[in-house]
Amino acid sequence: MNVIYPRTETVFLAGTIDNGNSTNWQEELIELCKHKDITFFNPRRKDWEGELSNKELEYQIKWEQDHLDQADKIIMCLLDNSKSPISLLELGLYAQSGKLLVFCNKAFYRYDNVRLTCQKYNIPLYPYDLDLIKDIL
């Protein structure tokens, strides 16, 4: 008899990092969800010290691309005081994936771009709130 065991859901934590200078919302969310059976792919590096070498940067980018592809869901949080250019790129790349859930407040400088992209591709858009994200997951 074949037994199929449930597997952990995988969630990529896309969004504001600002080279480690922003609120570490990723760690806070992981802590809030520690009781859930979720494997988080967290691109935030604890060892980010200014500029990475070309080799380190290439590894980081490829790691993120691979894990964005592999994830069951992509949680994207765009914080009010950030530009988040890579996150906006990822929003465009994964808009049609069916995996995105976006959390962004109206104070984000490109909120209307985010809102209209989410609307066009039927991406759920919520205000940024870690408790809300935890409840949705």
Image (cartoon, rainbow, N blue to C red):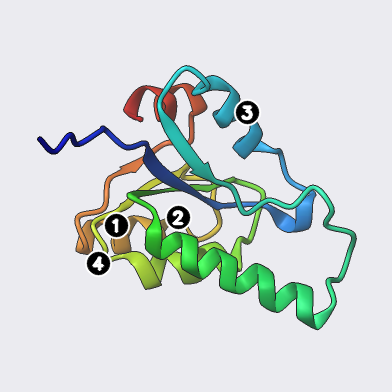
Q: Residue at x 50, y 69 (%)?
A: 65
- Give the distance between the C-alpha atoms of the residues marked 3 and 2, in whole angstroms: 23 Å
- Structural distance between the alpha carbons of marks 4 and 3: 28 Å
Relative to 115, residue 126 above or below:
above
Name the residue beneath numbered marker 1. 118
- Residue at image point 26% right, 63% down: 97
Residue 35 location (% of width, % of height): 47, 17
Q: Determine which quarter of the picture holds residue 109.
A: bottom right
Q: Secondary structure at mark 4?
A: loop
State which tag comes first along the sequence, 4 or 3: 3
Which numbered marker is on residue 37? none
Mark number displayed over residue 111: 2
Image quadrant occupied by the N terminus: top left
Residue linked to disc 3: 28
Q: Secondary structure at mark 1?
A: helix
Mark 3–mark 2 CB contact (< 8 Å): no
